[in-house]
């Protein structure tokens, strides 16, 4: 089962990198969400899936009465989900403001803070 989770995590990371390298801002957001979920799955898989080695055993007990799950990866994943949701909400608000101001989702066309190309070429000619 760990091998399946490792392959799935690798595929999710590869897909997220592919989406984030796109020039489209919407694809970047989907890649960011996919990367967040891949990291959550990685943390879950790192916490072991088998119950043969429980994380906590009382001092006077020789064995546990019932199988238990490792609670640390679950707590980390829950925290990561909350932080990821807050990041996603911030990204959506930033995306909507950017699209309202610039009118495009192409990252190469988002040059609002850059000087126009002809002024930049003239300034470089004066420096030489």
Image (tube, rainbow, N blue to C red):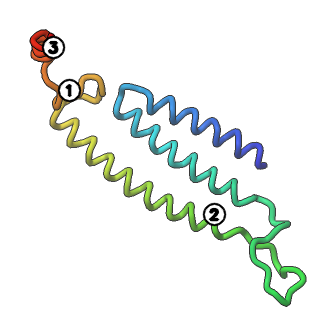
Answer with the quarter of the image where residue 85 lies.
bottom left
> Could you tell me which residue is drawn at 31 percent across and 46 percent down?
92
Q: Which residue is mark 1?
A: 111
Mark 3 packing: few (<14 Cα in 10 Å), some, or many (20+)?
few
Figure check: 41 above or below 103: below
Q: Are marks 2 and 3 in contact (CB under 8 Å)?
A: no
Residue 66 is labelled as none
Q: Are marks 1 and 2 in contact (CB under 8 Å)?
A: no
Q: Which residue is mark 2?
A: 73
> Could you tell me which residue is drawn at 31 percent across and 51 percent down?
90
Q: Position of residue 2 (x, y in %)?
A: 76, 49
Q: Which residue is mark 3?
A: 124
Camera-nearest residue between 48 and 116:
116
Answer with the quarter of the image where residue 58 lies.
bottom right
Q: Are marks 1 and 3 in contact (CB under 8 Å)?
A: no
Closest to the camera, between mark 1 and mark 3, is 3
Calculate the distance from the C-alpha at mark 2 to the C-alpha at mark 3: 54 Å
Q: Position of residue 117 (x, y in %)?
A: 16, 15
As drawn, is 10 to the left or to the right of 81?
A: right
Q: Secondary structure at mark 2?
A: helix
> Could you tell me which residue is drawn at 70 percent across and 46 percent down?
5
- The C terminus lies in quadrant: top left
As drawn, is 95 to the left or to the right of 19?
A: left
Q: Position of residue 74 (x, y in %)?
A: 61, 65
Calculate the distance from the C-alpha at mark 1 to the C-alpha at mark 3: 19 Å
Mark 1 packing: few (<14 Cα in 10 Å), some, or many (20+)?
few
Figure check: 65 above or below 16: below
């Amino acid at each position: 089962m760990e091998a399946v989770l490792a392959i799935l995590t690798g595929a999710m990371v590869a897909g997220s990198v592919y989406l984030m390298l796109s020039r489209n801002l919407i694809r970047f957001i989907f890649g960011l969400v996919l990367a967040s979920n891949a990291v959550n799955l990685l943390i879950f898989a790192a916490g072991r899936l088998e119950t043969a080695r429980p994380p906590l055993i009382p001092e006077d007990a020789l064995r546990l009465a019932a199988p238990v799950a490792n609670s640390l990866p679950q707590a980390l994943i829950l925290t990561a989900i909350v932080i990821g949701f807050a990041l996603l909400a911030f990204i959506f608000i930033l995306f909507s403001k950017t699209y309202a101001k610039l009118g495009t989702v192409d990252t190469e066309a988002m040059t609002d803070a850059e000087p126009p190309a002809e002024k930049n070429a003239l300034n470089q000619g004066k420096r030489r």
